[in-house]
Image (cartoon, grey):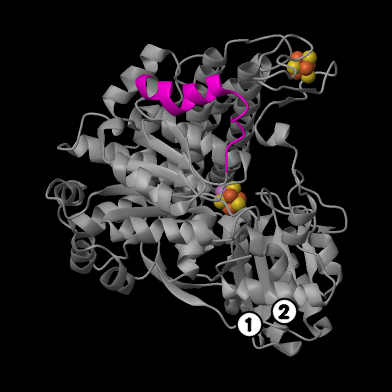
Amino acid sequence: KSADRSVNYLLEKTRDKGLETVWERSERQQPRCGFGESGVCCRICYMGPCRIVASGRGRRIGVCGAKAENIVARNFARMIAAGAAAHGDHGREAAKTLLEAAKNPASGYSIKDANKLNKVASVLGVETKDREKEAIAAEVAERALRNFGQQEGEVSFIRLAPETRQALWRHLNIIPRGIDREIVEMMHRTNMGVDHDHQNIMLQAARTALADGWGGSMMATELQDILFGTPSPLRGQVNLGVLSEKDVNIVVHGHEPALSEMLVLAAQDKQLIDLAKSKGAQGINLAGICCTANEILLRHGLPIAGNVLQQELAVSTGAVEAMIVDVQCIMPSLPDISKCFHTKLITTSSKAVIEGAKHFKFSEKNALQTAKEIVKEAIANFPNRGKVDIPREKMDLVAGFSHEAINYMLGGKFRESYIPLNDNVINGRIKGVAAVVGCSNPKVIHDQCHVSLVEELIANDILVVQTGCSAIACAKAGFLTPEFAEKHAGKGLAEVCKAVGMPPVLHSGSCVDNSRVLIALSEMVKVGGLGKDISELPVAGAAPEWMSEKAIAIGQYFVSSGVFTIFGVGLPVKGSEIFCQHIFEEFENIFGGMWAVEPEPRKMAAMIIDHI
Ligand code: NFS
Ligand code: SF4
């Protein structure tokens, strides 16, 4: 089931115990409905559901007359709207937290990176001269919040894109006016009986996706850097072996660092550590799952227990006192598996409540206080621990490659810039750059596609940038160490990695941090020598094991930004040849970037290498 031995080991154990995980449930869904899988099931109104067969003697149109390309486009566009909504809401929370940090010292939040604050202030047009950082931060937060409800104009971060790209977007009339506004319009236009032109639907889908990448996601990344610090390279560890037999294990899972950052503070509290000792533990071990894990790794070097498909397995070790979740990618199966062990499942967001879990209301106003209560709850649970079975697998890694860090690392202290990267591409040592990102999916062998694809790319001198669960997969396989370059990277890439002391695979953060990739690509254009637009750069994007709507939103903003983007597993579009032709071919003439799909990682690598 997995390329990761610790996963296979625990899966055998859970099966012996008669427990169920995502893999058993996935098998039970076989055979899957072909209409749904190929995107031609429409449930938008209740004259349906309608299922379309585009060719042959089947039902070619829905009850209302919708054709296959209309239905596929609407479904695809709605996935983009949902993904953009998730990232947008995350960005909104970051802005609210920044406002709290600026105005309410009792919240426990503060401004960690004043440099970044000034940079973001200048993008948002906030005056910085002779002002306290709190005053600047408050205005930055307020302006950021305005980006969501704005009705006209352009969202602020668009201006970080290359001029040529901005001009193209203006020409296509797809610059997002406000983040929320584009999502609402997307939902409206895909209602029963509104937009019946798949090309027109996809233009608004492109705008909605840009409102994610250059809007909500970028907001989340940039404001979190101000609040919690901009990542720079540091060492860490990954995989289920990071759970400790002797400590109170607290696993944070979800996405918003507003929660996990406070848990980091609470877990270091001397009184709470003493309390843990009084219960017979050695101390407190905080580890993460999914993107929250990436956030605490990048900023604190704290360990990652695993990616999205490992959430149930972490509980099945019997060593987790509390799993604390906020929003996104949290399986509703967690209370069931937690009941079979002593693990307390704790929800913290009023947006994400799970029946069977204990709810601690967390808000940016009482953050540290709540975090301490949660840690106490975990400590109190330590004496209830039964037999534990923690797999031995854990791997060292180096992570923390924000675009600022890459800049600094390549250019050195006195001439921070992307010039050396561009030079190395021009002189042929590095052939290009690929962003390999996204989820894990039980429809394919866990981690396998990520690992095989990345292996092939670096062997061909392509520098790989990673985020999300994909980064965790390659980290577990040992790809995120400078030493890995010597053995597995092509000669040119290995030389560059050795000179700079960096891994051939750069971990840039969580999924909202794909916005770092957009900024890095824009910098590569601005430095010059490789092309006048992102679409002219030798770069590509890939999500080999995607599953979430968020991944589709990311894919579309990469494409709308001019990047050739390839997805594994499959895409729910095959039901319409007309639609496929539009996003796989015609898109290139519109955006300079286009979608592709290929489940086989070696073939996927070949397509990326060809493109580059
Ligand atoms: Ni991205 Fe991060 Fe993982 Fe997929 Fe989920 S955790 S936001 S959506 S599964 S990569
Ligand atoms: Fe069927 Fe049209 Fe209703 Fe979709 S919108 S369910 S195709 S009638």
Q: Secondary structure at mark 1?
A: loop
Q: Nearer the viewer, residue 549 or 32?
A: 32
Which residues, given as a range, are shown in magenta?
A: 570-589
Q: Nearer the viewer, residue 382 or 104?
A: 382
Q: Earlier in the sequence, mark 2 or mark 1?
A: 1
Residue 603, position in %: x, y? 42, 49
Q: Residue furthest left?
A: 427
Q: Quadrant of ligand 2?
A: top right
Q: Residue furthest front?
A: 57
Query: Does the stretch in magenta take in 576?
Result: yes
| Residue hosting label 2 | 319
* For the residues bearing labels 2 and 1, Cβ distance under 8 angstroms: yes
Left or right: residue 394 compared with residue 560: right
Residue 375, position in %: x, y? 71, 70
Q: Looking at the image, can residue 364 be seen?
A: yes
Q: Amino acid at mark 1?
A: Ser
Q: Looking at the image, can residue 255 be seen?
A: no
**Quadrant, the C terminus:** top left
**Quadrant, the N terminus:** bottom right
